[in-house]
Amino acid sequence: MRNNNKKVSFSQKFDNFLNKDMNIVKNWKYYIIAPLVIVFVAIIVFACLGFNLGIDFTGGTILKVNFGTDISNSEYNNYKSEIESILNDNNIKKYSLQKEGSTEDASISIKFQDINGKTEEEMADVISAVIEQIEVTLNPDNTIPNFNVEDSQRIGASASDNLIRNALLSIGLAVLLMLIYIAIRFEFASGIAAIVALLHDVLIMCAMVIICRIQVNSSFIAALITIIGYSINNTIVIFDRIRENLRKDEYSKTTNAQMVDISVRQTLTRTIYTSLTTILSVALLAIIGVSSIREFLFPIIIGLFAGTYSSIFLSGTIWSFIYNRSKDKRLQKRLKEDKKKKETTSVKTENPEDKIVV
């Protein structure tokens, strides 16, 4: 007897799942719960601890310890512990160390923030003491011939202010240009919905950075701008499908909510696969990369998840709400115009000479 029960593959199960009614617009209240919880927790953490600002925003010092020869991982760990001890002895609490280069270009980069309450002159004395102690501790008998500590690079408060101002200006300009492009390419409702979805992505990125106590520096600003440019892609794909479906006769009687569900379902496979491959690539790079790369990639991973979520569950819903209101206003305006036309026509057709006087 032949068995007609065919085994269903994972891809077929996935496709069957996508073909189900999603009711995204109808269930919008459930989809905003997770973002609201994340933001609420972030507000509490921010009220208690604030941002974990790096030296790019607070001001600080960068030192570079050159060895002139290759250093092994075990040697680096020993040097690292000795440098950390020196920094702690000088009351420097916020710092980061990183190995750079190889062979004769091997070095250790030291970044630390200014001590609260210290003036520029006092910090100069602290920096001189740190450099001297590093030279004495790491190379006491001049056993490393090309060893030296490069002159410190200072990042002042004015440079931090310029960085913040330029970052905000770049983000604001990018968002404005996107709004103009989407409004021209699609419609104003789509532009507003896309910008609100982008703001969601930025808010979730900042919230998770606050919760996880990730250091906020120039790398975070670069990650923020990267996500703003990337996460808009999935949203544009969905809006493009909505526009195509609006022109089709088969969807002429569907509501805006149904149109969003249909369009999201049709583009869901593409959205998930492209986002998943990007996230896996970035996550792999974060695993094998150095600490400075992780500081840059971790916010990007958060932003990719947030962008995928907002593209699927939020952007179409926002478009539906805005489009419904604008359509209702246009309909009321058209009804008023039709009423005026009828009244004008009736007045013109009524001829007093045609009236019969008895």
Image (spheres, rainbow, N blue to C red):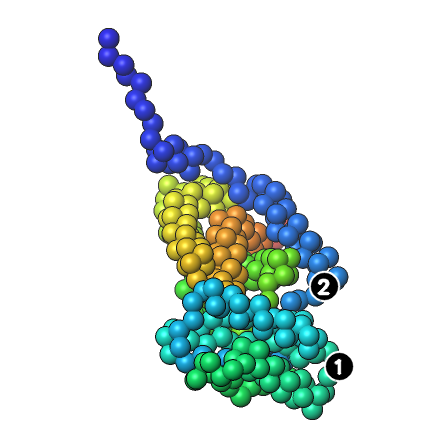
* Residue farthest along the front direction in this orientation: 141
Coordinates of residue 147 in the picture (x, y in percent): 47, 83
Amino acid type at mark 1: Gly
Amino acid type at mark 2: Leu
Observer-side mark, 2 or 1, equals 1
Q: Which of marks 2 and 1 is nearer the N terminus?
A: 2
* Quadrant (top left, top right, bottom left, bottom right) of the N terminus: top left
> Which element is circle 1 on?
loop
Coordinates of residue 224 in the picture (x, y in percent): 52, 66
**Residue at 66% across, 49% down:** 37
For mark 1, what is the residue?
117
**Residue at 62% across, 87% down:** 128
Query: Can residue 8 be spotted in the picture?
Result: yes
For mark 2, what is the residue?
49
**Residue 322, relative to residue 86: is it above or below?**
above
Q: Distance between the residues labelled 2 and 1?
A: 19 Å
